Image (cartoon, grey):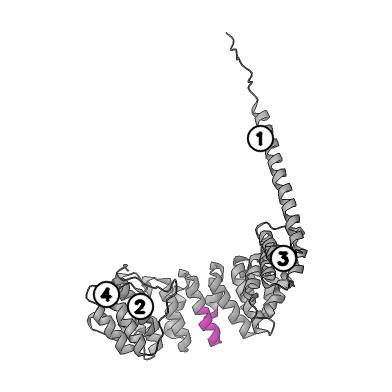
Amino acid sequence: MSLKLFGSYRLGSYAEIAGTCLLWGLIIWGGMAGWHFIQVGRQIGQLKDPDPATRAHAAGQLAKHPSSRAVQPLLDALNDTDFNVADSAVQALGASKDARAVQPLIAGLKDSSSTRYSHAADALGDLGALAVPSLVAALHDPDIGLQEGSRQALTKAGKPAVDSLIALLSDPDPRLREDAADTLGQIKDARAVDPLVNLLHSPDENLRATAAEALGAISDKRALDPLIAAMQQDPAATVKINAAEALGALRDKRADQPLIAAVQSKDPAIATAATRSIGQIDDSQAEEFLMGQFAARNLDVIADASTFFIKKGKSGSEDVLIQALNKTGNSSLAQDMLNCGNAKLHDAATDWAAKNGYEVTYNAGAKTASWGSGW
């Protein structure tokens, strides 16, 4: 028996179908590439338009559709007399991923008073690994604005900057060591944990304190025991404080007892840091300690652990929180009360602020804890 197919259609082989798909794909890709080529050429031309708005728009479009052909025209646009044009060129150069943009953008970091300063730092961060060697070199410059801009750019560059920053932890210049440790904390890459832990044994007090703070920002459990040891044994109060705060960021119940012991410190700043950190650890032992302090009306501890008590949102606890604010004058507690969504606490904090010379302003994202949101 034979199978007969009728009509004008025929069956093609898989190879024919694949070939047809490939051909159409190439045609579509070629069309898009051609369109992109034409559009980039048009936008490059518009960078010379007499209308500043047209020039700025063209630079903005080149940020969305990067092309190596546009890099030199964009570099020329950095000197445009119109700020918006020059600023858009900065951002487009960051998107270009072209090494030619690095040094001109670094030059833009030398004037920290310029409104283009932060955009230049962001653009350098967007260039990533291409900009890292030059940014690390710029950290050695005595110009403070250039140093700060380079740190901002390295932070945005992120992972590609980590190895170079770790190498700086051994630099003879103490400022560079601290800058590197601080930036590594902001990047939050786990590769930095062991080198930063090693710095907790440095003879440089400032470096130990910066390392402790950075380890808290990274919040890797490997730092738990070294941070506990630093809080308990370091001779410098600044290191103890930063280590205590870092332990709160780690939120590990194994830190409960060392932190509870640190609450008894004769140094109020250490006690405050330890109390705040206990309030961040979601653990029954930490909760039991804090609720015991609440029952005993230890207003200093209550003020320091305000976020915990706000999140707890225990019915009838408002009066005690208000007492704690009035006794301690703790501005962090006042801010928590203003933003937590509890009308009684909000009004009390507003009254306290007015009586104590504070101006209450409202900004998006100011809320740190919501009343009764849970712990």
* Label 2 crowd bin: few (<14), some (14–19), many (20+), radius 10 Å: many
> Residue at the spot x=59%, y=10% of the render?
2
Picture quadrant where residue 65 is located:
bottom right
Q: Earlier in the sequence, mark 1 or mark 4?
A: 1
Main SS class of the magenta portion in the image: helix
Give how far apart the Cα atoms at labels 1 and 4 are: 67 Å
Picture quadrant where residue 251 is located:
bottom left
The residue under label 3 is 51
Label 3: which secondary element: loop
Label 2: which secondary element: helix
Label 4: which secondary element: helix
> Residue at the spot x=22%, y=73% of the render?
315
**Residue 63 located left or right of residue 317:** right
Label 1: which secondary element: helix
Give how far apart the Cα atoms at labels 3 and 1 are: 45 Å
Q: Residue 338, labelled with which disc?
A: 2
**Residue 31 located left or right of residue 338:** right
Q: Earlier in the sequence, mark 3 or mark 1?
A: 1
* Label 1 crowd bin: few (<14), some (14–19), many (20+), radius 10 Å: few
- Measuring from the top left, give residue 64's x and y in whole percent: 65, 58
Q: Amino acid at mark 2?
A: Leu
Q: Residue furthest front?
A: 51
Select label 1 or label 4 by which is in front. Answer: 1
The answer to whether any part of residue 170 appears in the image is no
For the residue pair 128 and 352, the one nearer the viewer reads as: 352
Select label 3 or label 4 by which is in front. Answer: 3
The residue under label 4 is 288
> Residue at the spot x=38%, y=79% of the render?
335
Select label 3 or label 1 by which is in front. Answer: 3
Q: Amino acid at mark 3?
A: Asp
